[in-house]
Amino acid sequence: MSHSSITEGTLLWSPTPETVANANLTQFMGWLREQFDLDFTTYDELWRWSVTALEAFWAAWWEYTGVVHARAYDMVLAERTMPGAQWFVGAKLNYAENILARRTDERPALLYQSETTSLTAISWQTLHDQTAKLAHALRNLGVQRGDRV
């Protein structure tokens, strides 16, 4: 199909009902219904709530996704100013720990492609091993907890 044969408003693709039912967003909407009696039946309804009730949306997202943290946040959003908004004020977490906590052997950890390489998948085991090697090398260089690299 060429671009010239596409007319404005033409639906080019639609997910199957099974794909929709298994989508992460659908799962999140079901969780919101169970936990908070929030019944969103469309993406537009969820989006509208997410932009009108920012703090409630992001607090729910934090809980739903199971963010691993050493210290919970004191407030979701300090001020509604952009740029410069401060999210999850007071929280203490480790990004690498959160990424590695999602490990599953069914799916790759990372997919990457560059101008010179084909699409490459990195397994969770490879990511874990390479992360451990990097952490070991940084410790050998004298980097300690709390240092910024």
Image: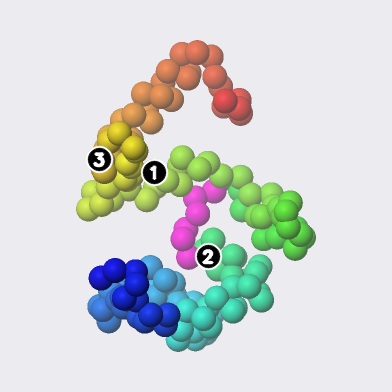
Taking the spot 27% from the left edge, 81% from the top edge, the residue there is 17
Q: CA distance from mark 3 to mark 1?
A: 25 Å
Of the image marks 3 and 1, the number of the one nearer the N terminus: 1
Q: Which residue is mark 3?
A: 118
Kind of residue indicated by mark 3 = Ser
- Using residue 94 as the reference point, say whether residue 10 is left or right of it: left
- Residue 142 visible in the shown view: yes
- In this view, the residue farthest toward the top is 141
User: Within 10 angstroms of label 3, few (less than 14), some, or many (20 or more) residues?
Assistant: few
Residue 62 x %, y %: 54, 61
- Using residue 33 as the reference point, say whether residue 121 is left or right of it: left
Count of numbered badges drawn on the protein:
3
Of the image marks 3 and 2, the number of the one nearer the N terminus: 2
Taking the spot 55% from the left edge, 76% from the top edge, the residue there is 47
Q: Quadrant of residue 55?
A: bottom right
| Residue 66 colored in magenta in the image | yes
Label at residue 13 = none
Kind of residue indicated by mark 2 = Trp
Label at residue 100 = 1
Q: Which residue is mark 2?
A: 61
| Residue 98 colored in magenta in the image | no
Vertical placement of residue 88 versus 127, above or below: below
Q: Which residues are magenta?
A: 64-69
